[in-house]
Image: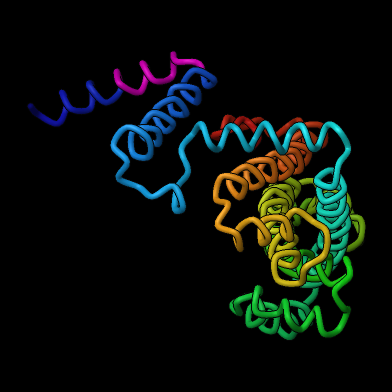
């Protein structure tokens, strides 16, 4: 088979994949994963239930946790605690990340003096800062918010700075030729041009803030979902751990798609068909 034939087959294969609805492809993948999961844990029994519970055991705990949430029991309070942590941490990370991103992207001082320190901090394992935040702020929600915001800030800094750099030289020269001030160029050219980059950073931060909040609750105790996961893991209740993680993923997805929805409203001119339909 020559190269032309291979290319033709590949194009036809891609065209066939494109004709399959996205929801159908996602459903097929989910069914395949669950089937393999059930085969490994139930049919063949080659995986210990302590390591990986069966789909039915996980479903049972999913129903239990869901019922607990609907009846307003202690798990609902734990979910509300985690939600508040994520919300405030994301707002703080957005504000600080955007401000530092503009500082780095717009000033020589930020680029030459501040950015090297930010890069150095970003290379550190941020989870290692959890004991420090707990020592400084205590075991209350403040330490969890601080850790989650700390983790989520850096993607926003980088994406904001990259977005401000994305305006072309011709566009900058045009604004300069009409006498636009530095602030006018920033507000009317660089920020609108950089919005796709900034929202990319916000999406990454939405994932990071969830990880930071749960890590803080896992290490620092409290009443959030992270503390519930730690309690369940300590008793080797693996199905409950899986169920709690799955519900947490819904919270993370809600934040991610809220950012994606806002992006589509504010950056409607930037059409994208990236995977997930949210780019």
Residue 19 shown in magenta: yes
The percent coordinates of residue 180 (x first, y second) are 90, 56
Vertical comparison of 203 with 179: above or below: above
Which image quadrant is residue 90 in?
bottom right
Residue at image position (47%, 43%) is 53
Q: Nearer the viewer, residue 175 or 28?
A: 28
Residue 268 found in image quarter: top right
| Residue 162 showing in the rendered view | no
Magenta highlight: main SS = helix
**Residue 122 placement: quadrant:** bottom right
How far from the left and from the top, in percent, is residue 194? 73, 51
* Magenta highlight on residue 264: no
Q: Position of residue 129 (x, y in %)?
A: 70, 79
Q: Is residue 279 above or below residue 131?
A: above
* Residue visible at 83% across and 49% down in the picture: 83
Magenta segment, which residues? 12-21
Q: Is residue 33 left or right of residue 27?
A: left
* Quarter of the figure that contains the N terminus: top left
Q: Residue at x 69, y 84 (%)?
A: 117
Position of residue 93 in the picture relative to residue 151 (left or right): right
User: Does any portion of residue 25 appear in the rendered image?
Assistant: yes
Residue 58 or 184: which is nearer the viewer?
58
């Amino acid at each position: 088979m020559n190269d032309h034939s291979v290319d033709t087959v590949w194009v036809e294969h891609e065209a066939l994949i494109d004709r399959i609805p996205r929801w159908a492809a996602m459903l097929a993948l989910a069914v395949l994963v669950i089937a393999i999961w059930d085969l490994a844990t139930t049919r063949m029994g080659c995986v210990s239930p302590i390591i990986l519970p069966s789909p039915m055991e996980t479903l049972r705990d999913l129903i239990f946790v869901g019922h607990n949430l609907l009846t307003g029991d202690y798990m609902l309070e734990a979910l509300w605690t985690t939600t508040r942590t994520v919300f405030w941490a994301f707002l703080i990370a957005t504000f600080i990340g955007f401000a530092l991103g503009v500082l780095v992207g717009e000033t020589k001082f930020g680029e030459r003096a501040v950015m090297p320190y930010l890069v150095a901090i970003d290379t550190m394992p941020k989870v290692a800062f959890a004991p420090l935040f707990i020592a400084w702020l205590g075991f209350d929600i403040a330490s969890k918010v601080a850790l989650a915001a700390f983790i989520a800030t850096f993607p926003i800094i980088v994406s904001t700075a990259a977005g401000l750099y994305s305006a072309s030289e011709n566009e900058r020269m045009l604004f300069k030729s009409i006498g636009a001030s530095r602030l006018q160029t920033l507000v009317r050219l660089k920020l609108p041009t950089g919005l796709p980059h900034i929202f990319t950073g916000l999406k990454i931060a939405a994932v990071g803030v969830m990880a930071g909040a749960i890590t803080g609750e896992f290490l620092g105790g409290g009443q959030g979902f992270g503390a519930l996961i730690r309690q369940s893991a300590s008793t080797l209740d693996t199905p409950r751990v899986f169920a709690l993680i799955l519900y947490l993923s819904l919270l993370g997805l809600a934040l991610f798609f809220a950012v994606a929805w806002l992006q589509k409203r504010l950056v409607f001119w930037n059409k994208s068909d990236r995977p997930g339909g949210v780019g």
